[in-house]
């Protein structure tokens, strides 16, 4: 029933080439896209970082967290609440600090949740995320249900006072786009490296058979806790960028829907391969955008009913592409090869 | 806190706990017997509340609305089980989570199309609209007592059904060892359909009974769903008895938390869950 799915650690060469070309197209996008779409693609990349962080748990370690948005939102709040009121916080200390706070929260909550298994893990992660949600929702000091504004974008300045030098300003949508792109690629490279390290292999082993890993002498509790805290930290990087881009954070960022969307992004692209999480995040945001923008058909505003289309889309994905888009492409490729022989 | 206030809060917490039990019992039964995680369980609660609102304005009677709504819920449960859930019993939990999350969106939008997005109130039936005076200026509404009564009656009925009837014996046999029960001639598919419809109906009836005091509004299922998860985790998945005790415990902590420590009331229940997890990671009454 909860047998681990074969995951997509390696991709066929053809697919790698396509993804490489897509990356080049992505990096060139600001030269052709309008401001609106540059912001949208930036948002997609932020969500891709978020989805990759969850994939470390969901696809690699086999831990389905339905509360990952808590760590995403926490870092956004950290940016909003720790920034000085009248000056730009420096990215160089605020990003690491915000991510570390998310990681710390994940470590603390992880201590409770990683001792549970399967369905318990799903429910418990969700419940703890709700606890964090209420911490911010109920307390006026922390913004309450209205949320908090991030008035000034973080600065890239190096040095202090009069000697400081700011090479580029994040107020420019282009700078923000490329900063996000670089961070996305760094996170991707880091996680790919991690996946093939002894630690990553141990996590994959836990997904396949935790009892056997324990019998082999691996401390699975420590491994899972480390993965959970690391995933929380990386989700924090994404949440920080989200707060900086939109200039506003509210409790919904930590809500149940945000967490479920992340799970869906990972599934949609294909689990266990961080490229899948990126593809999933882009596809999900795009599909959502299309559904919300559907035209008026006669007397019915199709876009107003986006939840119906989104729900049906999710149900269809689960029914027909449970291994995601990359999994689908890979399977079609294999079928073609089998046909050629 | 004087005695009358204490009594009111105690009755409120028991009433809230019993309501949570109705929802959590369905959730835990569906998981315990079919192995399905159902995130859309909160939507059934919402559907129940809207049914109570629209049927009671049609029939002019809440009692008739609840009876009619219960019949519709059984049909809805059977249809959903046959169309979708039946195919997901053997699937990964992850697939079940996604399927039922998709269903939340679908139910939410269908609710918006059929009933609109307005907030509605459901009038308390005249017969039950009185209040019992406790002191000069404090009183307790009869309807809340009636709600607790309905929940207790259903809990007792559920207990008798599962532990004393032939159908209950088959349900327990199916939960214990599906293949063996099937080999002995139990129609396990029928049992699954019945249990699913029962779970759905418990959730909608909870929504219908709660409608007069909680009012009826969009998305009212989500907070309830998460609370039910907490109840199921504390009680132990698959255990109806555990769900009852956990629901009462959560009701107590939540209600008195709001009175005594309002600043952290929203978090208290989750702290309770964390404490239980440290002590018994599998819940209080793991089957």
Image (tube, coloured by chain):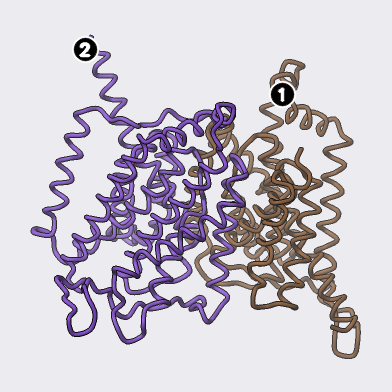
Chain colours: A purple, B brown
Quadrant containing the N terminus of chain A is top right
Q: Quadrant of residue A166?
A: bottom left
Above or below B144: residue B238: above
Viewer-proximal residue, A23 or B177? A23
Mark 1 crowdedness (10 Å alpha carbons): few <14, some 14-19, many ≥20: few
The answer as to whether the residues below labels 1 and 2 share one chain is no
Q: Residue A199: horizontal and vertical position, in percent?
A: 43, 38
Give me the residue at 82% from left, 51% from top.
Answer: B154
Give the residue number, with chain letter if any, for mark 1. B187
- Could you tell me if residue B87 is visible in this image? no
Give the residue number, with chain letter if any, for mark 2. A340
Quadrant containing the C terminus of chain A is top left
Q: Residue A162: horizontal and vertical position, in percent?
A: 18, 85
Mark 2 crowdedness (10 Å alpha carbons): few <14, some 14-19, many ≥20: few
- Could you tell me if residue A14 is visible in this image? yes
Q: Residue A174: horizontal and vertical position, in percent?
A: 15, 65
Above or below B260: residue B220: above
Q: Secondary structure at mark 2?
A: helix
Label 1, label 2: how far apart the Cα atoms are: 45 Å
Q: Farthest residue toward the bottom? A: B136
Q: Is residue B186 left or right of residue A35?
A: right
Viewer-proximal residue, B118 or A246? A246
Chain letter for mark 2, please: A
Label pair 1/2, CB-CB below 8 angstroms = no
Q: Is residue A244 left or right of residue B2?
A: left
Give me the residue at 27% from left, 14% from top.
Answer: A338
Give me the residue at 42% from left, 52% from top.
Answer: A261
Chain letter for mark 1, please: B
Q: Residue B247: horizontal and vertical position, in percent?
A: 76, 57
């Amino acid at each position: 029933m909860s047998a681990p799915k074969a995951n997509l650690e390696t991709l066929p060469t053809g697919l790698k080439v396509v993804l490489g070309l897509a990356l080049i197209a992505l990096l060139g996008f600001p030269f052709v896209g309008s401001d609106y779409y540059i912001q949208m693609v930036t948002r997609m990349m932020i969500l891709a970082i978020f989805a990759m962080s969850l994939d470390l748990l969901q696809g690699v370690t086999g831990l389905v967290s339905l509360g990952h948005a808590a760590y995403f939102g926490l870092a956004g709040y950290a940016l909003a609440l720790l920034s000085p009121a009248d000056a730009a916080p420096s990215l160089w200390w605020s990003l690491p600090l915000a991510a570390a706070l998310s990681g710390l929260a994940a470590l603390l909550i992880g201590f409770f949740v990683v001792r549970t298994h399967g369905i318990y893990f799903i429910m418990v992660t969700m419940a703890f995320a709700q606890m964090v949600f209420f911490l911010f929702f109920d307390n006026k000091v922390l913004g309450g249900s209205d949320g908090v504004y991030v008035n000034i974008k973080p600065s890239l300045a190096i040095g202090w006072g009069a000697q400081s030098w700011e090479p580029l300003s994040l107020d420019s949508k282009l700078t923000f786009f490329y900063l996000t792109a670089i961070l996305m690629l760094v996170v991707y490279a880091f996680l790919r490296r991690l996946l093939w390290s002894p630690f990553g292999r141990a996590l994959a082993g836990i997904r396949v058979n935790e009892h056997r890993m324990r019998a082999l002498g691996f401390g699975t509790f420590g491994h899972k806790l480390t993965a959970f805290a690391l995933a929380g930290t990386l989700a924090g990087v994404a949440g920080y960028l989200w707060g900086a881009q939109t200039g506003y954070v509210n409790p919904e960022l930590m809500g149940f829907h945000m967490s479920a969307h992340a799970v869906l992004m990972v599934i949609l692209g294909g689990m266990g391969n961080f490229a899948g999480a990126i593809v999933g995040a882009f596809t999900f945001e795009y599909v959502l955008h299309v559904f919300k923008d559907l035209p008026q058909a006669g007397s019915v505003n199709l876009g107003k009913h986006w939840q119906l289309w989104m729900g049906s889309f999710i149900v269809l994905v689960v029914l027909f592409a449970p291994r995601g888009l990359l999994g689908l492409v890979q399977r079609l490729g294999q079928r073609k090869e089998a046909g050629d022989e | 806190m004087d005695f009358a206030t204490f009594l009111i809060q105690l009755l409120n917490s028991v009433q809230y706990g019993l309501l949570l039990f109705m929802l959590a019992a369905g959730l835990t039964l569906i998981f315990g017997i079919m192995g399905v995680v159902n995130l859309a369980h909160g939507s059934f609660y919402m559907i129940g509340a809207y049914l109570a609102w629209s049927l009671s304005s049609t029939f002019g009677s809440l009692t008739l609305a609840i009876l009619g709504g219960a019949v519709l819920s059984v049909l809805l449960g059977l249809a959903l089980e046959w169309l979708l859930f039946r195919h997901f019993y053997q699937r990964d939990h992850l697939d079940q989570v996604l399927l039922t999350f998709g269903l939340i969106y679908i139910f939410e939008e269908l609710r918006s199309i059929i009933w609109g997005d307005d907030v509605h109130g459901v009038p308390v039936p005249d017969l039950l609209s009185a209040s019992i005076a406790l002191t000069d200026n404090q009183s307790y509404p009869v309807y809340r007592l009636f709600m607790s009564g309905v929940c207790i009656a259903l809990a007792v009925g559920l207990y008798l059904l599962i532990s004393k009837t032939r159908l209950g014996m088959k349900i327990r046999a199916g939960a214990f060892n599906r293949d063996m029960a099937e080999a002995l001639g139990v129609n396990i598919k029928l049992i699954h359909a019945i249990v699913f419809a029962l779970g759905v109906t418990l959730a909608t009836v909870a929504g219908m009974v709660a409608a007069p005091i909680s009012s009826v509004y969009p998305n009212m299922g989500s907070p309830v769903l998460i609370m039910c998860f907490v109840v199921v985790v504390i009680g132990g998945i698959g255990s109806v008895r555990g769900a009852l005790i956990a629901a009462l415990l959560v009701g107590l902590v939540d209600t008195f938390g709001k009175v005594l420590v309002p600043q952290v009331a929203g978090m208290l229940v989750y702290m309770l869950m964390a404490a239980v997890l440290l002590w018994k990671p599998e819940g209080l009454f793991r089957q």
